[in-house]
Amino acid sequence: MSRSIPFLELAPMHRDLADELKAKFAALLEKGLFSGGEEVEVLASSMQEFLKVPYAIPCANGTDALELALRALEVGPGDEVIVPALTWVSTAEVVKMVGANLVFCDVDADGLMDLTLLPSVISPNTKAVIPVHLYGKMMDMKSLAAIAQKTGIKVIEDAAQAFGAFQGGKSAGAYGDIGCFSFYPTKNLGALGEAGMLTSHDGGLSERLRLLLNHGQPQRDVHELIGRNSRIDTLQAAFLNVKLSYFTPWQQRRKALAKLYLDHLQHLKGIKVPSSILQENHNAHLFTNQTNQRDALKECLSKKGIGTAIHYPLPVPAMKPFGEIDAFPVAARIGKTTLSLPLHPYLREDEVRYVCEEVQRFFNKA
Ligand SMILES: *Cc1c(COP(=O)(O)O)cnc(C)c1O
């Protein structure tokens, strides 16, 4: 019997929530309210409570959040910003967008910025570092904060993949000067379109971020800064308010499915599973493995109807717009060996078992 297990399936979740989501849409349509308003304020305050941060500032998307963070910290031409060599391209793009110089740091075996290398790439021109909680696994933020403090550099956390991860009781995004989140539809908490958010502990910085994302306007017809329009869409804020109330059970579901994967695959020779995925500081965003037979495994699973994804095939510095630089061996190796298996709250246990059986069959045959 041939099966179809897509890498990610959002339709069943939205079928479950359809009545509530449609009611939100109907209410806003009736009001004619499409920008700002109560839903945006409710989202900000719910997020402050959920993440235990004093300031949460919804915005248009995660990439804008990162760029706004750099602008709020006045990072620009002549400044250097350190980003990991392996990440979604946004983390590096925004540094170029504000005119600063990009400095890459190679990653560790888990794909996170290698903190043993970080001090060697910090220079007198370094203004900020952007750690990325890749796959949903948090960086060691205590150690990073210690390095940043000693060298006087700012920390902007790219927590786009890590909503719902906590370390020592503190949320991803709550350690840095500014935390950046994305609610792109495929993230653990996804909008029905584009959305993002910034967090901070600093009231002044938060106010600056709020101004920057709304034309520098504290109120209508008053402009204090050169800003832009990076406001969240009211509809997306409303949809996120619905979805946030389901987030905790979805996370429990992700963890239970991740455990099922680990139970079946962790002793298998030839594949390295994400062994820390059940910890609190991992939000189980992606079940990302490493194997030297990546391409063959991907092909084999695809023939069995199982969708997989590669996060990410190329280190950012190796991409064309970044100069095709091949100087980050760990990031490059992960690019060739990494494979993510399906993991989302609406995946069924029998589907995970089927994926595990096929992975086992592949390695036992090899
Ligand atoms: C998704 C993502 C972003 C960008 O978020 P958007 O909302 O798509 O702009 C940034 N960094 C990382 C690591 C991401 O995964």
Image (spheres, grey):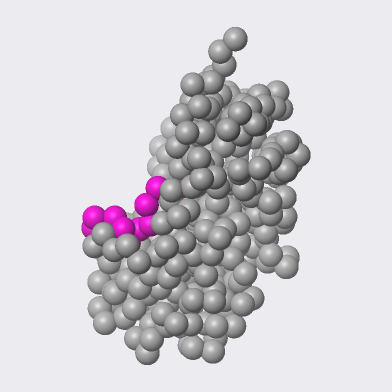
Q: Position of residue 308 (x, y in %)?
A: 50, 34
Q: Position of residue 330 (x, y in %)?
A: 46, 61
Relative to 271, does residue 3 appear above or below in the rendering? Answer: above
Asked if residue 284 lies left or right of residue 232, the reply is: right
Q: Residue at x 35, y 66 (%)?
A: 327
Answer yes or no: is residue 93 visible: no
Relative to 306, does residue 73 appear above or below in the rendering? Answer: below
Residue 147, quarter of the rendered image: bottom right
| Outermost residue to the top | 1
> Viewer-proximal residue, 151 or 181?
151
Span colored in magenta: 311-321
Q: Position of residue 194 (x, y in %)?
A: 41, 44
Q: Which residue is drawn at 60% across and 9% down?
A: 1
Asked if residue 325 lies left or right of residue 130, the reply is: left
Residue 264, quarter of the rendered image: top right
Q: Residue at x 53, y 21 (%)?
A: 304
> Viewer-proximal residue, 289 or 7?
289
Q: Residue at x 52, y 82 (%)?
A: 148
Quadrant including the C terminus? top right
Relative to 93, does residue 278 appear above or below in the rendering? Answer: above
Give the mark count: 0
Asked if residue 214 lies left or right of residue 187, the reply is: left
Answer yes or no: is residue 98 visible: yes
Q: Position of residue 172 (x, y in %)?
A: 60, 62
> Viewer-proximal residue, 317 or 19?
317
| Outermost residue to the front | 366
Is residue 106 shown in magenta?
A: no
